[in-house]
Image (tube, helix red, strand yellow):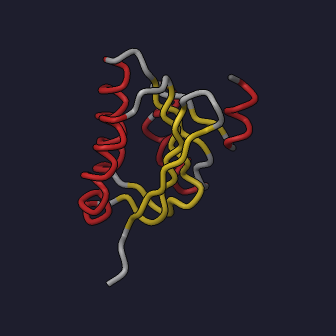
Amino acid sequence: MQKHLSLSVEKIGETGDVLVKFNGEFDKAGHDEIKEELGKVVDDFKGMTLVFDLTDLKFINSEGIGYFMEIRTHLVTDGKKLVLVAANAHVADVFNAIGIMEIMPIFNTLSDYINKK
């Protein structure tokens, strides 16, 4: 059975920032599949900025957005931040409709984020 959502994690250069790449659909089933793994990434994160690469995220619903907001709140409480990069047109439309850009930074590409640091 194919997973709805998977993720991979890598460090970004020497900054301590961590890049989390999502692949699939962030709905109830996808959330259930990655919740434990992503929770561990967030809990173990020691850098200043956690970057979510949404290049291969095909879909996100309110549950996925709510989980992003929970993660952001957790990070902000610790003086850290969450940045989103490379949302496709569908995901960007959802973010625009609910005003996510007012809450957390969104960059068109990972390079845009790195160059604006």
Name the residue located 41 percent from the left edge and 55 percent from the top edge: 60
**83 over 52 or under it: above or below:** above
Q: Is residue 77 left or right of residue 47?
A: left
Name the residue located 37 percent from the left edge and 80 percent from the top edge: 2
Residue 58, percent from left and from top: 50, 63
Q: Residue 85's quadrant in the figure?
A: top right
Name the residue located 43 percent from the left edge and 21 percent from the top edge: 80
**32 over 20 or under it: above or below:** below
Q: Is residue 13 left or right of residue 23?
A: right
Q: Quadrant of the C terminus?
A: top right
Name the residue located 34 percent from the left edge and 35 percent from the top edge: 44
Viewer-nearest residue: 7 or 72: 7
Q: Is residue 110 left or right of residue 24?
A: right
Q: Quadrant of the N terminus?
A: bottom left
Q: How many marks?
A: 0
Which residue lies most toward the front here?
A: 14
Q: Residue 32's quadrant in the figure?
A: bottom left
**22 over 105 or under it: above or below:** below
Residue 54, percent from left and from top: 54, 51
Residue 27, percent from left and from top: 32, 60
Viewer-nearest residue: 66 or 15: 15
Residue 46, percent from left and from top: 42, 27
